[in-house]
Image (cartoon, rainbow, N blue to C red):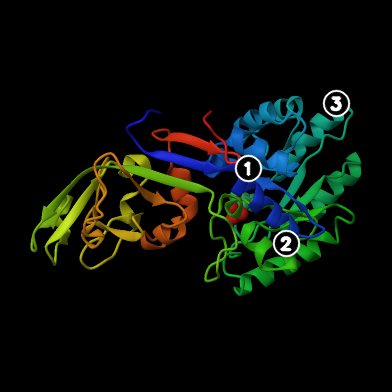
Amino acid sequence: MGQFGGRLKIDLGAIQRNWRGLDSVSRTALTGAVVKADAYGTGLVPVSAALWQAGARFFFVANADEGIDLRHTLPDAHIFVLNGLAAGAAQFYADNLLMPVINSLGELDQWLKLCIAAEEALPAAFQFDTGMNRLGLRLQEVSIVRSMMEQSGYLPQMVMSHLACADQPNHEKNRTQRALFQSLLAQFPDIPASLANSAATLSGRDNHFQIVRPGLALYGGRAVQGRPNPMAPAVTVEMPVLQVHEARTGETVGYGATYTLNRDSRVAVIGCGYADGYIRSLSSSNGKPGAHMWFGGRQLPVLGRISMDLTVVDVTDLGQNVPLPGQFVEVFGPNSLIDDAAEAGNTLSYELLTSLNGRYTRVYVDENGAEFSV
Ligand SMILES: *Cc1c(COP(=O)(O)O)cnc(C)c1O
């Protein structure tokens, strides 16, 4: 934190509008909020407080450490831990009112033992794997799950699964997984069901069931491929210009000399690199365009390889309007979309957001436009 590096501005009002937008898309389904990985790099504490204020009551984190941090911020939230019940930690979850997403028979056994000892049906979700081979109870285990439930009289708060290809709404895997999930639900009558991440929430009512679980879309990311993004950008990254200079046709830029200038150019050296999460795959070479920054109404292409703390961009087309040392260029934001950068870098806005790290000065903007830091 300081005044000489990058600035990361998080628009809490935009995150709140995005949550409300998703809540109206999901109609009668409850709208949760996925705040794992420090709310996708935007800051768990201020973002969760803003989401609560907007009306969110169901929160999803990756592990119990994140769950504890969230519990301290939101004493009354319903908190699900997606990565499940850590071994030997059942009492810890119960003490902090964290609901494990039960992902295996071993976890179920551990949780039911605690419920019996506590003489209390402590709430939890059951997740079934319908086709990702990631976490989740196996579909063929459903009869064992049913008999464990009958023996103990236990009912879960929610039954869930996760789609592998939700970002491609026409992918046939979505139909297959949805059908498997539907038939599974017959075994859990009257238990609320949840299938949808952001993309599935935005792409069809068939996915909504009783609770939706958007993450990326809250933070303004483009969840569905090949469609206009209805969400408001919530994250702006600005980086300082260190130097502007002239360079000649035929000169190369950066490590590896991967980019040769094909015209006399004016270049700006920006104080930002992969140590700031401006990852190396956003680099360019003559054969491959990279990401762009933005200043003065124009896109500024990245030239050559991104280094640890420095990136060079082409400012030739700005003419006399070049930025001065100390001015800031927009790296990600409303004019320089993080999803476009992700596409140029052959990655996802998920990775770019969660790569934004502690090097930034973080500023939050509340729904009234007031700025504050935490
Ligand atoms: C991360 C995650 C989500 C949220 O996904 P987005 O694509 O960010 O909306 C939902 N459900 C599960 C199980 C997840 O791991």
Q: Distance of mark 1 from mark 3, alpha carbons?
A: 43 Å
Residue drawn at x 31%, y 51% is 280
Q: Distance of mark 3 from mark 2, alpha carbons?
A: 40 Å
Q: Residue 332 or 184: which is nearer the viewer? A: 332
Q: Residues within 10 Å of mark 2 (few under 14, many from 20)?
A: some
Q: Residues within 10 Å of mark 1 (few under 14, many from 20)?
A: some
Give the farthest residue toward the front: 320
Residue drawn at x 66%, y 35% is 49
Q: How many numbered marks are there?
A: 3
Residue 285: horizontal and vertical position, in percent? 22, 62
Q: Residue 83 or 212: which is nearer the viewer? A: 212
318 up-or-down from 65: above or below: below
* Quadrant into which the N terminus falls: top left
Residue drawn at x 52%, y 71% is 226
Q: Which residue is mark 3?
A: 118
Query: Residue 44 vs residue 289: left or right?
Result: right
Rendered image quadrant of residue 341? bottom left
Question: For the residue labelled by badge 1, is the local secondary structure a helix, a strand or a loop?
Answer: loop
Residue 25 is tagged as 2
Q: What amino acid is found at the position of numbered circle 3 in the picture?
A: Ala
Residue 367 is tagged as 1
Q: Residues within 10 Å of mark 3 (few under 14, many from 20)?
A: few
Q: Residue 281 or 104: which is nearer the viewer? A: 281
Residue 348 is tagged as none
Q: Is residue 259 visible?
A: yes
Rendered image quadrant of residue 231? bottom right
Residue 324: horizontal and vertical position, in percent? 24, 44
Question: For the residue labelled by badge 3, is the local secondary structure a helix, a strand or a loop?
Answer: helix
